[in-house]
Image (cartoon, rainbow, N blue to C red):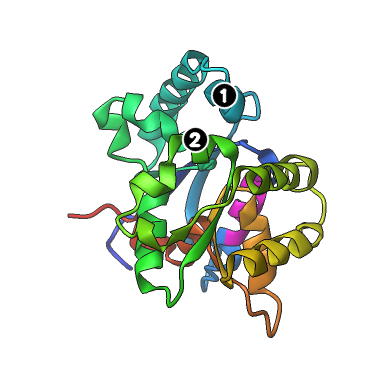
Amino acid sequence: MRGIPAPTLGILGGMGPVVSAELIKTIYEYNPTPTEQEAPQVVLFSLPSAPDRNQSIHTKNEGPFLAFMEAQLRRLAPLCDRILIGCCTAHYSLPSIPEELRQKVLSIMHIVDRALEKSDEPGLLIASTGAYDKRLFQDGCKNADRIIELSRPDQEIVMGLIFEVLKKGKDPQIALPTVERLLDKYGTRTFVSGCTEFHLVAKMLDAQPGNTIRAIDAFSIVAREFFDIVRPSG
């Protein structure tokens, strides 16, 4: 809108790099503008060198990752109005981050929570074992009673999809039969994208005519509602 400064989104990404690159593409695909100058403003820090989130949790050696998150958020914060952390599991670090930095971070859990409230059926939480161990969505969503949890063996199956298919840049279509089998097993046609990599699956499904699977994907929501979500309030 003329006279109102364009908002800038900062993405702390690279966790993993393939989906961070795809998220930038999604933002521009979902926000066509009359001129290039009106397109969304985005600053991406793609930092694959970030310590492994799940390993940090499982080995109880969280210090290096927490230090990484605070350092990179401090670098990114002056460049943008809001920050999107490009890894759901990484949100476990936020309670350790100073308040002045946390205020700029968009909560994936809050975005998912609003979508769950509007959903006509519960969603199967497809997330990493680290996100499950930290109960990021179960404790971070007011509508957690609308979340269906995977068994631990099924969480491990999802980890295989994350690390052997999606993080390696393989066709997300490869993951679809497993996702469909899990949805059938747990009795729903909706899943919560509780791992950033499943943005790739959500976007693929969104482009398929006649698809009956619904993905509650915070990254797609941010892309679609970019200007409303990113513009500072007040």
**Which residue does the numbered mark 1 point to in the structure image?**
58
**Which one is nearer the viewer's eye here, 210 or 59?**
59
Question: Against 209, is 29 above or below?
Answer: above
At which x and y percent is residue 57? 53, 25
Residue located 59% across and 64% down the image: 186
Query: What amino acid type should be assigned to the residue bearing mark 1?
Result: His
**Label 2 Cα neighbours within 10 Å, binned few <14 / some 14-19 / many ≥20:** few
Determine the main secondary structure of the stretch shown in magenta: helix
SS at mark 2 in the image: helix
**Which residue does the numbered mark 2 point to in the structure image?**
133
Q: Is residue 181 left or right of residue 54?
A: right
At which x and y percent is residue 91? 44, 37
Residue located 61% across and 36% down the image: 15
Q: Where's the N terminus, which quadrant?
A: bottom left
At which x and y percent is residue 123? 50, 64
Chain part drawn in magenta: 19-26
> Any mark on residue 18, and which?
none
Q: Is residue 103 left or right of residue 192?
A: left
Query: Is 25 one of the magenta-colored residues?
Result: yes
Asked if the residue under mark 2 is in contact with the one under mark 1, i.e. CB atoms within 8 Å, the reply is yes
Q: Is residue 28 left or right of residue 18?
A: left
**Which one is nearer the viewer's eye here, 157 or 201?**
157
Question: Against 182, is 164 above or below?
Answer: above
Q: Where's the C terminus, which quadrant?
A: bottom left
SS at mark 1 in the image: helix
Residue furthest out toward the bottom = 210
Query: What amino acid type should be assigned to the residue bearing mark 2?
Result: Asp
